[in-house]
Image: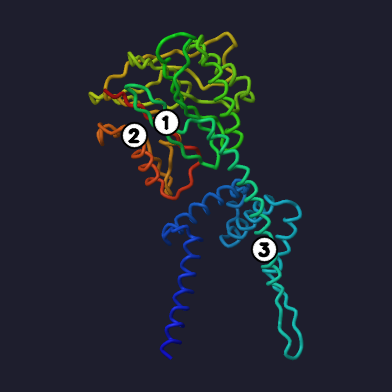
Amino acid sequence: MSANSNAAQQLKRKRWQGVQDFWARVTEGLQISELWGQFKSEAHASYGLYSKDVDGDEINKEKKKLKRYFLAAWALFQALLMKLSPARRVLLLIAAILLIFQPDIRGGGNEVTLGLGWVGAAILFVLLALELGDCVTMKRDLEIAREIQQWLVPDHPPLVSGMDIAFATQPQNTVAGDYYDAFLRPLPAASPGNGPLLVVVADVAGKSVPAELLMATFQASLRALSAPSASFDEIVAGLNRYTRAHSLDGRRFTTAFLAELNPQTREMHYVNAGHNDPILYRASGEIERLSTGGPPFGLPLFSENDLPYQSGRARLQSGDLLFIFTDSVVEAANGTGQEYGQSRLLELPEAAPLETAAETLKRVMTDVNQFVSFARQHDDITCLVLRASS
């Protein structure tokens, strides 16, 4: 009996371990509170998607509360229905009718009663499997697009004497419309030393694949324009011309901040093309905003011969920190709709002025993520930190 009892206990523990392993795979190690927070965030985002197709004003005209709820539910159901293909719409309607009315097929004697509601549930399961299959296929394609996009941006910053650089991005979707880069421009043949450092952060209007494709063309044009013979102003003018030619009449404009730094003198020549003003934290405690420039690239507001971009200049001193970011950082919102805001970024130098660029970047990104928690964001989050070292 003792041996049988031990064997039974071991079998029981093995089964329980199997259940725990399965649960760990399903939840990816998340706690119940984290799962619930993630679900609420996803549900809120899905509701926002479907509610766009609902005429709320028309529903609110109904004075009877119960009927108003019914009209809202019916409108949301129709919005969901129209997101499906025609064949799947018919299946969903059939499933809904069967689940609501549930007519029974009853047999005589000892025969089992079968409710057609189970048929409706089976149809819903089939629809879920079909939609999931589409999502998996699309996700695989997006993952490939993301791999291609990762080839277009650097995976590590360049090694520049006296400059400490770090960057990071968090796509709102699998692929992003943000672009960041830092590279040493080539010098003419036989010229000694390294060329100037070119730093850029850009944000293409829009999201996901369309924005990613335009980001790729922006990156290609920037690299092509950064030939040894081109001046910084010529690069800016060329980017504007190229972006305007592919902006769909200004609907796909690009905000960007570009800076060219001389590693020896630390002189910085920059243009802000409609981007969030980067923050220059001086080692002395002063804060400067780099706003000199012009409108976003691609807006059809100027003739081909115009150069609407003024360039600014600054000189970095030892310990100064340049923080470049996209608007999604300050506009990152938590579950209550509260935004991260500019004030938190302006407090950055007081927290740890002697951090490396990577440490500062990690602290900011962690703070943003903790602030928004599971709230789904509406745009990509990108930051670049450059600190002038001694």
Q: CA distance from mark 3 to mark 1?
A: 44 Å
Q: Residue at x 56, y 39 (%)?
A: 146
Q: Which of the 4 image quadrants contains residue 300?
A: top right
Residue 38 image position (x, y, % from top left): 47, 54
Where is the N terminus found, in terms of image quarters? bottom left
Q: Do the residues under discs 2 and 1 have CB atoms within 8 angstroms?
A: yes
Q: Residue furthest front?
A: 3
Describe the element under mark 2 as helix, strand or loop: helix
Q: Mark 1 or mark 3, which is nearer the start of the sequence?
A: 3
Describe the element under mark 1 as helix, strand or loop: strand
Residue type at numbered disc 2: Leu
Residue type at numbered disc 3: Leu
Does residue 186 lie above or below 94 as drawn?
above
Question: Closer to the camera, 334 or 1?
Answer: 1
How many C-alpha atoms fall within 10 Å of the one at disc 2: few (<14), some, or many (≥20)?
Answer: some
Q: Which of the 4 image quadrants contains residue 357?
A: top left
Residue 157 image position (x, y, % from top left): 42, 29
> Which label sits on residue 124?
3
Residue type at numbered disc 1: Phe
Q: Mark 1 or mark 2, which is nearer the start of the sequence?
A: 1
Question: Closer to the camera, 252 or 212?
Answer: 212
Does residue 360 lie above or below 263 as drawn?
below
Describe the element under mark 3 as helix, strand or loop: helix
Residue 133 image position (x, y, % from top left): 66, 54
Q: Which of the 4 image quadrants contains residue 152?
A: top right
Residue located beneath label 1 in the image: 325
Left or right position of 31 against 74: left
Q: Residue at x 70, y 64 (%)?
A: 123
Q: CA distance from mark 3 to mark 2?
A: 47 Å
Q: Mark 2 or mark 3, which is nearer the start of the sequence?
A: 3
Residue located beneath label 2 in the image: 345
